[in-house]
Image (cartoon, helix red, strand yellow):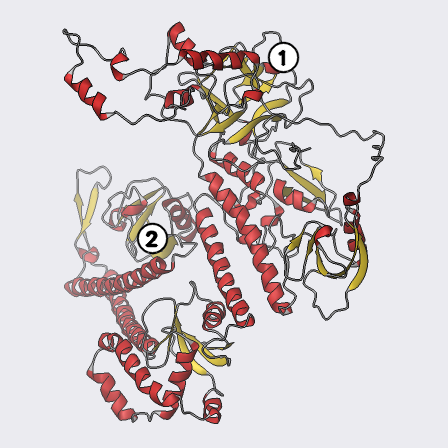
Amino acid sequence: MWPVLPSSMLNEEFDWSIEGLLDLSSSPMKRPVSKTPEQRVSVRLRVLRNGEKKNIRSLVIGLDSSSGWKSQCTEVLNLPSAARRLFNEKGKEVFSLKDLQRDELVYVSCGEHWINPDLSIAQQRKQVFRRSLEFDISKIKTFCSMRKVEALVLEVQSDLVCGGKLAVNKPVADFEEEKQVKGPEGRQMGNAALITRDAPRETLDSHARAHLRMEACRRTLKYAWQDPSYNLAADGSLPKKAEKELFEHVQPPKKRSHFPKHSRLWKRSHQEFEYRDGQIISLAAPRLVLGVQVSRPRSGTEVILVEKKSDESRQHWTHKADSRTFHLVSNPDLVLAVSMTKAKNEAHGYPVIIQKYKPYSNGAANQKWDYMENKRAFIAFHSTALDKEITLANFSGLCTSSVTKENIDQPGYCYISPDGKRKITFCLACGRSMRAKKELKELLPRVPFFCVSGSAQKFLPQGPFKVISVAKADLSSSEAEDTLRYYEKCLSSLRMKTHACITSHGGVVPSYQKVVKIMAYKNGDGYRNGKLIVAGTFHELLAECTERLQLTRAASKIYTRDGTTILTLHDLVLWAIGEKLTPRQPKGQEKSTESVGTEDIAVQNTEESSRMTMESRLGFVEGIDKSLLAHVLRSPVAVWVSCGEPFLPLNAPWKSEKIKKQNWLKRDKILADLDTMKHKMRQLKGRRVAACQPATMVPTQSPLQPVVVQGGWTEQTQEEMKLMELIRQTEAHLSESQELQSRHSLIEAQRRAEGQHSLYQAPRVKRVWVYRNGDRPDDGTYVQASALSELLDDCTARLKMSHPAKTLYTSNGELIRSWDDIERGMAVCVSAGQGFITSKEKK
């Protein structure tokens, strides 16, 4: 039921609650005796499905203005679902059959928007895909906007009268800024501020209207000197400061209302409540408490201000601290909750209702409250961040697997697979989209599960989305904004492509109407991985290059072989013709010109030379024969596509590969020399040990090593020491070159990431050399990890330790305390908890 004015217009100012019940066993209503001709109109129309071509034979049927035309069109046109909307030939929606002429052509829709029948089937599919993507993005946008909402408090939405509406909204200010009004005088001031000019007089009771009349009669204009806050001087005159302020604030007289404005203190009083004796009392109006007026409250009933009664159970609440909920005493299954079915209004917030209690750890944040006694406020959504996100996902119609990848306690549904072996679980949003296809059962609380729509398996349903994959939509706390930004960028690119197609279809003649065959390459890839693209407009060319070349961002610049920037297809055709007619330089001259200047100078001069070349070609293009033009455009034109970065020479990838190959050859030579020196070192050591020269036992004062072996077979020779020093220098040089190369690649990756703003970022992985405590540093292996705990686990597995690794030391014996102390390529000593010891000390 809707409140309607006598003129059949919707009464938008109506704010009383409308109540009603659905009775299944009620008798049919009596039809009116008198029927006017306007109530029933039959008209003969030609109908087609939404998007069908006009050349298809349309069906001629007689439609009734009542709801019977929907079932008639559904049956005649064999629609997949019930007919809901009508459109005329121009795509304008028809709401009444009285606006149609006899035998007029109309299109019947099942609820979707109008599809232009003049478009091709491929264009229609793109249009439907774009609208479906808009629908999915609107859900993600609603979720992201609701996540930004900060603390919300309970407040009185209207005036402090019986029947006043409640909502949750942002707090007016910090509660510590203003002092609370104490004493009977302050309480009377709060009661006097109950009625304001915003309240319609028809909705107020007699007591409230009496307050309005008294305030209007009693309030008179007061001058600044009549304010008791000004202290008069001894001679009865105003102080100089007050006199100055008096004349500064003089304003011309204007028509003023008798009612006070919404001051900050007045708004603050609407957000102050007290929980006492099981009742939630408004501090500004102690005679009013929170309650429900209906005799049989049910889930969804609005909570309002009611007159305080000590024996009324519908205005008493039981606070349960463990669940942070307020239960209605008359029906403990109903709790105080925030209604999120309606869109939030910045001025009014979310309405407050009673709702059936949800005993779930996540997905019921709108039922959890916190009463701050010192601030006299009720804080809504007093729960964990995960609970809030799951609740917002449920009300936004998003799958909870996009928010978290863990098994959590949440409301959901399940059904048994056809083979009867598996129990498939769905979250609340996916269950709502699946309940028309499957027979679902509601899951019991305290049963953690993960929604199956988030799996990457292809046979699973799409979930609440129409085109977006649930498994690829990451809406976690750190990735939700980036995901929304990515899909909005995809939508804008799709709109640009669709707009270009519609523009060319609508009769706008472009600068060059013929399609052009183009061989597109990535900027910097040279002649590798080219894609053949046929485009009729420049916008279409950019969109196709972005999709076919799999660019991380939208293509924005097109370059030719000589670095000329192309802005339109007409410019590309001119360049191709000029390239065909202009004689090329010999290869020797090209090499000499390339060797004169550096690449940076060539890149800087590219735009100037391309502009001069284009101006020189414009003069002779007008008189070109059409056969020559067709011959030039017969073969594809090679272009290089950029996302905004400058043009890179075509030999850039060859040079980089050449340098990389040289570096690898140098590294291989160093490694071969290092292996030779290590082999020689092992031979020298073996000869020294095999000689078995006697050694001297020297006692020490250390309890860990009471005897030290000196001289003889344990002492290294001079040749060994020189060779060891050479090995260390070679290893240091090799590690420095590797570190320099890794830093260079890391800087390039960071620059690329900053320019591309990628959605996902790789973890910070470090590769270190690890060996056991007490072993030689050479007896180790390389380990890669992104965290300290991961490094300890990998060391335990790779070094085959009998006890798990617990402590890490540097090669000098310094304790490693955090992940930042570890550098790439460094040697790390791994211990199971013992102190640092060298291999010599262990022997």
Q: Which mark is residue 348?
A: none
The tag earlier along the polypeptide, 2 or 1, is 1
Residue 504 in the figure: left or right of residue 680: right
Question: x, y (%) of residue 329?
Answer: 62, 15
Question: x, y (%) of residue 131?
Answer: 58, 56
Mark 2 crowdedness (10 Å alpha carbons): few <14, some 14-19, many ≥20 = many
Which residue occupies 37% across, 55% down? 783
Q: Is residue 652 above or below residue 679?
A: below
Which residue occupies 37% across, 9% down? 182
Residue 708 in view: yes
Which residue type does callout 2 highlight?
Val
Residue 150 in the figure: left or right of residue 50: left
Please name whichever residue, 303 or 327, is drawn nearer the observer in this view of the structure.
303
Please name whichever residue, 361 or 407, is drawn nearer the observer in this view of the structure.
361
As helix, strand or loop, the secondary structure at mark 2 comes to strand
Question: x, y (%) of residue 596?
Answer: 20, 84
The part of the image, by quadrant, that contains residue 788 is top left
Disc 2/disc 1 C-alpha distance (Å): 71 Å
Residue 304 in view: no
Q: Which residue is mark 1?
A: 313
Please name whichever residue, 59 or 377, is drawn nearer the observer in this view of the structure.
59
Question: x, y (%) of residue 794?
Answer: 41, 50
The part of the image, by quadrant, that contains residue 247 is top left
Which residue type does callout 1 highlight?
Ser
Q: Which residue is mark 2?
A: 770
